[in-house]
Amino acid sequence: MPRFEYHSTAPVPERAILVGVDFGKSEWSLDDSMAELGRLAETDGAVVVGSLTQKLDAPIPRTFIGKGKVEEVVSAVRALDADVVIFDDELTPSQQANLEKIVKEPTKIIDRTALILDIFGQHAKTREGRLQVQLAQLTYVLPRLRGMWSHLVGEQTRGGIGSRFGQGESQLEVDRRLIRKRISTLKSELLQLETRRGVQSKARWESGVYRVSLVGYTNAGKSTLLNALTGAGVYARDELFATLDPTTRSLDLEEGRKITLTDTVGFIQKLPTMLVESFKSTLAEVKAADLVLLVCDASDENHDLQIAAVERILGEIGASDIARFIVFNKCDLLDDDARAALEREHPDAQFISALEEKGLRGLMHRIAREASEGDTTLTALIPYGKGLLIKMVHERCQLIHESYGELGITVTVRASARMAATLAPYRVEDELADA
């Protein structure tokens, strides 16, 4: 027998109870929303041990759910030895505090917003991503500080020496000031990063590179698609919010034009407002795109609701006017009848399987067609000393004809509006070029 008993040091998953309320106003069914909440909890490392639901016309001001349902939650926590209770909707600070008093420690009460923020905190890898998540977390925590110093407030209410100085409130205000100061610092740092990103984006715009952004509901397969098209090697797993930080890769179309493809953070229904605000600098990549590919999981029965959720967020960030089309991914999971029905419903969409690399050639042709929309055919005589411009022509334009003369290189190309403007000083008539 070993002298010492060995104990596993692996973290023990928290046991979670989910709570959802049907107000009869959402496009999503309560069952679907709760199933998604369960996936979020599992992504965050919890084990779902129970689920409770209720129908209400409006939230109960004090506890969000009715008194009887609160008692059910308490009983379920005791019976199932739950570590955390997760609400599918955002709780007010007072509702959360009241529920914590009723359920009692050590069981935690959190809502969908806190859960998503925690997942983002785990998955953010770049400095900008971590700053954005921290800003969102502190914005969420700030109004919920009251009650964290209740032990000091308790001393104050007993009276006696020192009670007149209000230790609890003093500490609370100190924490609030510290958080407000940190929020201000984070906003300043993110503004600097946003400015730098804007300079990079402007440089790409001026270079004439056609920019494509991948957007979509979380777990739709955007990262897998980026990997399939560019070999980017981006982390991709079957979990919600597997990647948060934007990744941009260049890609050559068959016609010779170079484009960039950017993978962005996934969206979700009830995405916390403070996250959208915090990630605006990242989402600026979408706003700066020439084309948006709205990637959707074809096998998810709620794909239309997911598309609507993505469209709504694109509107919130001011990107609703950018050219886009839908790309239904994971079509390998559909049978022939289901795929045919989807194609009838969305005749303008592209249908692919990024995992099995099927339909990608058709997708690339569609991107090339969109990229050449609005192109003009022109002839330009570029002096030999303009090596960078010659390189840009080969990378950014569709080259139709090229010849070398005494004064320079004469090219006939299909060029985008930006490249046509760049080449304007060197444009010549075909007859002159031939001479």
Image: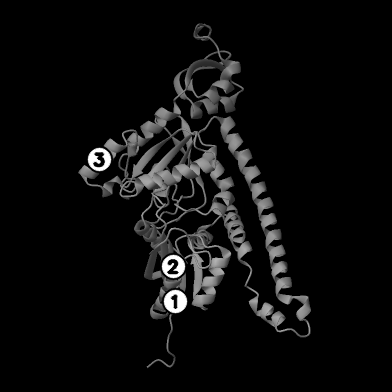
| In front of the other: 113 or 348 | 113
Image quadrant where residue 205 sits: top right
**Residue at the spot 36% in from the left edge and 55% down from the top edge:** 29
- Across and down, in percent, residue 22 comes to 40, 59
Which kind of residue does numbered mark 2 sit on?
Gly
Element at label 1:
helix
Which residue is disc 3 drawn over? 341
| In front of the other: 37 or 119 | 37
**Vertical side of 202 occupied by 273: above or below:** below
Distance in Å between CA atoms under marks 2 and 3:
37 Å
Distance in Å between CA atoms under marks 1 and 3:
46 Å
**Residue at the spot 66% in from the left edge and 55% down from the top edge:** 186
Tag 3 or tag 1, which sits nearer the N-term? 1
Which kind of residue does numbered mark 3 sit on?
Ala
- Across and down, in percent, residue 98 comes to 54, 71
Q: How many marks?
A: 3
The reply to whether dot 2 and dot 3 touch (C-beta < 8 Å) is no
Element at label 2:
loop
- Across and down, in percent, residue 323 comes to 46, 32
Image quadrant where residue 371 sits: top left
Which residue is disc 1 drawn over? 74
**Residue at the spot 72% in from the left edge and 80% down from the top edge:** 156
Which kind of residue does numbered mark 1 sit on?
Val
Judge whether residue 226 can be spotted in this image. Answer: no
| In front of the other: 296 or 415 | 296
Direction from residue 239 to residue 162 in the image, left or right: right
Element at label 3:
helix
Q: Residues within 10 Å of mark 1 (few under 14, many from 20)?
A: some
Q: Which mark is residue 352?
A: none
Q: How is the image coloured?
A: one colour
Which residue is disc 2 drawn over? 45
